[in-house]
Image (cartoon, rainbow, N blue to C red):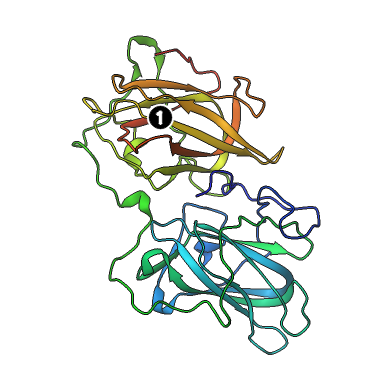
C-alpha cells in the first residue's frame, strides 16, 4: 500500500476539480446502502469479499440513482487486483464505463465515462466491478473496500496503472491454483505461542508499563485494534514469544483515531538482525497532509527500541492518527512486538 493513502476514515469531499489535482485521496462514505457485497462498502478496511477470479463480478446495487465519477478500490491481499472493468446500467443498457490495466499497487482509481454522452460521470443505480486479473494471475480476487467518487468530487490519481489496450484489459491465459487470503493471516509465527503476560514493562524501566493496543469496537461496531496488512497478528498480540517477518512494507489501519506519543519495537530474543531500520508515515485528514511520523535506526545488537512521533512540522508531539504505514529501510527483519505509546503514557529512552 502506498504510504500516503488514507484508508481508515472516509470523509466527504467538498471541492470540485479535475483528475490529478489532489495529492491525497478523499474517501467518501456511500450515501445509501449497497445490496451487493456489504463487506466491500461498509467503510471497514478489516472486512473483505473473496471471489473466484473466473467469476469475480462484484455488484453494487442501490435503491436510488446517483451520479458517479468513478471508484477507488482497495484490494489488500498479497495478490492484489491489477485489472478491472466496470459496467453499469444506464438508460436500459449495460455499457462498460471504466477500465483499469496493470495496477502496480493495491489502491486503484477507476474513472467513468458515459459512452453515450461522453460525460466524465454516469447516472445509475447499478454497477458491476469485474476483476480481469490479479498479481501473479492468482485464482481468487479479494476486495476490502470500494469507495464512491461522486460527480463534482476532486479526484486523486495514484498514477499506478498503464493505458489499457483497445478492448482491454484481457484475462490471463492461465491461472495458478494458489488461494489468496489476506496476507495478515498467511505468514507463520516464529517461536511457540504462550499465554501472554498480564503486564509488561520496558526492559530496565519498571516504571514504564507497555500498553496494549485498544480493544473493543467503535460506535458503528467496527474493531478498534489494528487491522494489519502484509503482517500477522503476532506483532501486536502483546506476546514477545511470537514473531513475524512482515513484507518490505506493512500497515496498521484503524477504524477510529487515537492519540499516540510513539511506539516501542521489540525484536525476537536472539535475533541476528536485532532492531531493523524502518520509517513510518501517516496521513492527517484534517490538514490533508502525509509525513514521516517516526524513524528507527538499525541496531543489530539491540532487542528493544523506542520511536518518538513527530508532527507534520517535524516537532516531537502527540499525534492523532488512524493509520501507520511501515517501510523497512533495509532488509525486512523479524519483529516480535510493536507496542503503542498513548497520550499520557510514560515514554523512556532504551
* Depth check, front residue: 174 or 78: 174
* Depth check, front residue: 115 or 43: 115
297 displayed left or right of 40: left
> Mark 1 falls on what kind of element?
loop
Q: Is residue 347 above or below residue 29?
A: above
Q: Which quadrant is home to the C terminus?
A: top left
Where in the figure is residue 142, as x and y percent of width and height? 43, 64
Q: Residue at x 33, y 51 (%)?
A: 185
Q: Residue at x 78, y 82 (%)?
A: 117
Q: Residue pushed farthest bottom?
A: 92
Q: Residue at x 30, y 28 (%)?
A: 267
* Depth check, front residue: 275 or 160: 160
The answer to which image quadrant residue 181 occupies is bottom left
Q: Is residue 94 above or below residue 213?
A: below
User: Are there few (<14), some (14-19), or many (20+) residues within 10 Å of tag 1?
Assistant: some
Where in the figure is residue 4, as x and y percent of width and height? 58, 44
Where in the figure is residue 319, as x and y percent of width and height? 60, 28
**In the rendered picture of this protein, how many numbered marks are placed on residues?**
1
The answer to which image quadrant residue 290 occupies is top right
Q: Which residue is mark 1?
A: 277
Q: Residue pushed farthest left?
A: 192
Where in the figure is residue 233, as x and y percent of width and height? 35, 42
Q: Is residue 30 above or below residue 60?
A: above
143 displayed left or right of 335: right
317 displayed left or right of 81: right
* Depth check, front residue: 123 or 121: 121
Q: Residue at x 48, y 15 (%)?
A: 347
Amino acid at each position: 500500500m502506498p504510504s500516503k493513502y488514507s484508508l481508515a476514515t472516509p470523509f466527504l469531499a467538498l471541492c470540485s476539480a479535475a483528475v490529478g489535482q489532489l495529492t491525497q485521496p478523499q474517501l467518501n462514505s456511500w450515501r445509501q446502502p449497497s445490496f451487493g457485497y456489504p463487506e466491500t462498502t461498509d467503510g471497514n478496511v478489516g472486512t473483505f469479499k473473496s471471489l473466484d477470479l473466473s467469476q469475480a463480478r462484484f455488484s453494487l446495487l442501490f435503491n436510488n440513482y446517483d451520479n458517479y465519477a468513478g471508484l477507488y478500490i482497495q484490494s489488500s491481499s498479497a495478490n492484489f487486483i491489477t485489472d478491472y472493468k466496470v459496467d453499469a446500467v444506464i438508460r436500459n443498457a449495460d455499457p462498460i464505463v471504466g477500465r483499469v490495466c496493470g495496477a502496480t499497487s493495491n489502491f486503484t482509481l477507476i474513472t467513468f465515462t458515459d459512452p453515450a454522452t461522453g460525460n466524465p460521470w454516469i447516472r445509475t443505480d447499478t454497477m458491476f466491478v469485474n476483476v480481469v486479473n490479479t498479481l501473479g494471475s492468482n485464482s481468487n480476487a479479494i476486495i476490502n473496500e470500494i469507495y464512491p467518487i461522486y460527480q463534482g468530487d476532486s479526484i486523486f490519481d495514484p498514477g499506478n496503472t498503464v493505458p489499457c489496450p483497445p478492448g482491454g484489459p484481457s484475462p490471463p491465459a492461465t491461472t495458478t491454483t494458489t488461494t489468496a487470503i489476506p496476507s495478515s493471516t498467511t505468514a507463520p509465527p516464529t517461536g511457540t505461542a504462550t499465554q501472554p503476560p498480564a503486564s509488561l514493562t520496558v526492559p530496565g524501566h519498571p516504571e514504564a508499563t507497555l500498553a496494549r493496543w485498544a480493544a473493543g469496537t467503535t460506535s458503528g461496531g467496527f474493531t478498534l485494534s489494528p487491522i494489519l496488512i502484509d503482517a500477522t497478528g503476532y506483532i501486536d498480540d502483546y506476546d514477545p514469544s511470537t514473531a513475524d517477518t512482515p513484507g518490505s512494507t506493512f500497515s496498521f489501519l484503524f477504524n477510529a483515531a487515537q492519540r499516540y506519543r510513539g511506539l516501542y519495537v521489540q525484536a525476537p530474543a536472539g535475533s541476528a538482525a536485532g532492531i531493523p531500520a524502518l520509517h513510518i508515515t501517516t496521513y492527517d485528514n484534517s490538514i490533508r497532509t502525509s509525513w514521516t511520523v517516526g524513524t528507527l535506526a538499525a541496531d543489530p545488537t539491540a532487542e528493544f527500541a523506542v520511536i518518538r512521533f513527530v508532527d507534520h512540522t517535524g516537532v516531537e508531539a502527540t499525534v492523532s492518527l488512524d493509520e501507520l504505514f511501515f517501510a523497512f529501510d533495509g532488509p525486512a527483519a523479524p519483529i516480535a512486538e510493536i507496542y503503542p505509546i498513548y497520550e499520557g503514557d510514560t515514554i523512556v529512552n532504551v
